Structures are given as structure tokens and as C-alpha cells.
Image (cartoon, grey):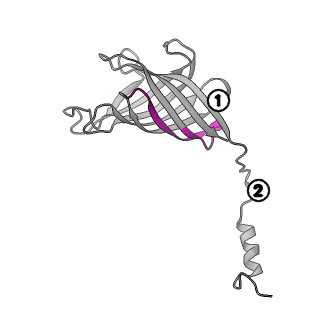
């Protein structure tokens, strides 16, 4: 009887079985995929007595660039249930954004962790990274990961400017985040 794998030895099969990780040995199990929709407001405060976002770096041309190209801002912005600053705190947007376009104003590269401090997702994070064109009505930014209850997260965030104070730059942004996770 001819073998389909003439060079395949039984000892190789045993070796492959031994090298294949098992779920029981390493505790790694994906579980069922869960769909979650989160809704909150992001408060980016760049002025006043207690700013939550501030410029930490710039390029040689940032201050003469019409787009602010090269400016990097670190943030620890509150996430709240409603648009009011005294609304219930649900988390923080911690990370950075940078002015990423030489030619067009308002195109940011955002890299942030949405760190939740309340309710079912307390202690869990969602990581968001991508382009945020702040003058568009609705912006879609990819969800690229997460931790805790959002382990293996993927999805997207939709951002809509709720208020923008042109004189100060302070903004409140409404977020709808759609996440698949395990």
C-alpha cells in the first residue's frame, strides 16, 4: 500500500504532537466572541488651570507650518457618560495625538488607550490608533487591541465633535466604539 507522505516518519509525527501547544497546558483559550458597543464623551482640555492635554514636542517647522505639522500632544482626557464636564467619569483617554499633515489642517495621528474606571469594564482598556480628521462630521478610527475584558479587541470608533471652542481649542467629542473581543 503506497503512502501519501513517503518521507513522513512516525517519530516526526510524535515530535509535532509534542511541540503543538495544548489549551489545557498554557491556559490559552479564546472563548466566544463578544460584541460590545460603548458610548461616552471625551473631554480634551488644552487651556485653563488643569489642562488634560498638552504639547510635549514639535518639529523645526511646527510654529511656521499652517497645519501645525509635527506638534505632539500627550493627553489624559476624561471620558464621561454625558457631554457635561461634571458628568459621571467612566474612564480616561491616555495617549497622544500628533499633527500629521503638511498640507491639510486637522489631520491627526491618534494613539490612545481608553482606560475604563467604572462598571463592568473597570480596569480594562481598548487601544485605538489611526487617523482622526477632526473637521469631518464623523471620523472612523481603528480599534487595534485591548486588555482585561477587551483582550483580543478589534473594531472601530466613531468620533463626532460635540463642542469645539475655537478660541481655546478645548473640545468635547462624542464616541461610539464598536468592539469584538473574547
For mark 2, give the secondary structure.
helix
Residue drawn at the location 52% of the way across and 11% of the way down? 86
Provide residue 62's location: percent of width, then percent of height.
Answer: 24, 35
- Per the image, the residue denoted by label 1 is 121
The foreground one among 146 and 5 is: 5
Q: Up-down: is 147 above or below 45?
A: below
Residue drawn at the location 28% of the way across and 32% of the way down? 105
Crowding at label 2, few (<14), some or many (≥20) Cα neighbours within 10 Å? few
148 inside magenta stretch: yes
**CB within 8 Å, label 1 to label 2:** no
For mark 1, give the secondary structure.
helix
Provide residue 102's location: percent of width, then percent of height.
Answer: 25, 39
Residue drawn at the location 32% of the way across and 17% of the way down? 168
Provide residue 160's location: percent of width, then percent of height.
Answer: 45, 25
What is the quadrant of the N terminus in the image? Answer: bottom right
- Per the image, the residue denoted by label 2 is 25
Specify the segment rendered in magenta. 136-155
Amino acid at each position: 500500500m503506497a503512502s501519501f507522505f513517503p518521507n513522513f516518519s512516525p517519530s516526526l509525527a510524535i515530535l509535532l504532537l509534542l511541540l503543538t501547544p495544548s489549551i489545557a497546558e498554557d491556559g490559552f483559550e479564546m472563548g466566544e466572541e463578544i460584541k460590545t458597543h460603548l458610548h461616552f464623551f471625551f473631554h480634551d482640555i488644552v487651556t485653563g488651570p488643569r489642562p488634560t492635554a498638552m504639547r510635549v514636542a514639535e518639529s523645526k517647522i511646527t510654529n511656521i507650518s499652517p497645519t501645525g505639522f509635527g506638534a505632539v500632544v500627550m493627553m489624559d482626557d476624561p471620558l464621561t457618560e454625558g457631554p457635561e464636564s461634571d458628568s459621571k467619569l467612566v474612564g480616561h483617554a491616555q495617549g497622544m495625538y500628533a499633527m500629521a499633515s503638511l498640507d491639510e489642517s486637522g489631520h491627526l495621528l491618534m494613539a490612545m488607550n481608553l482606560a475604563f474606571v467604572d462598571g463592568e469594564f473597570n480596569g480594562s482598556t481598548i487601544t485605538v490608533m489611526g487617523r482622526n480628521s477632526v473637521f469631518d462630521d464623523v471620523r472612523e478610527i481603528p480599534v487595534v487591541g485591548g486588555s482585561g475584558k477587551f483582550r483580543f479587541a478589534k473594531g472601530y470608533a466613531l468620533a463626532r465633535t460635540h463642542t469645539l471652542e475655537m478660541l481655546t481649542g478645548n473640545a468635547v467629542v462624542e464616541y461610539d466604539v464598536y468592539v469584538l473581543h473574547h
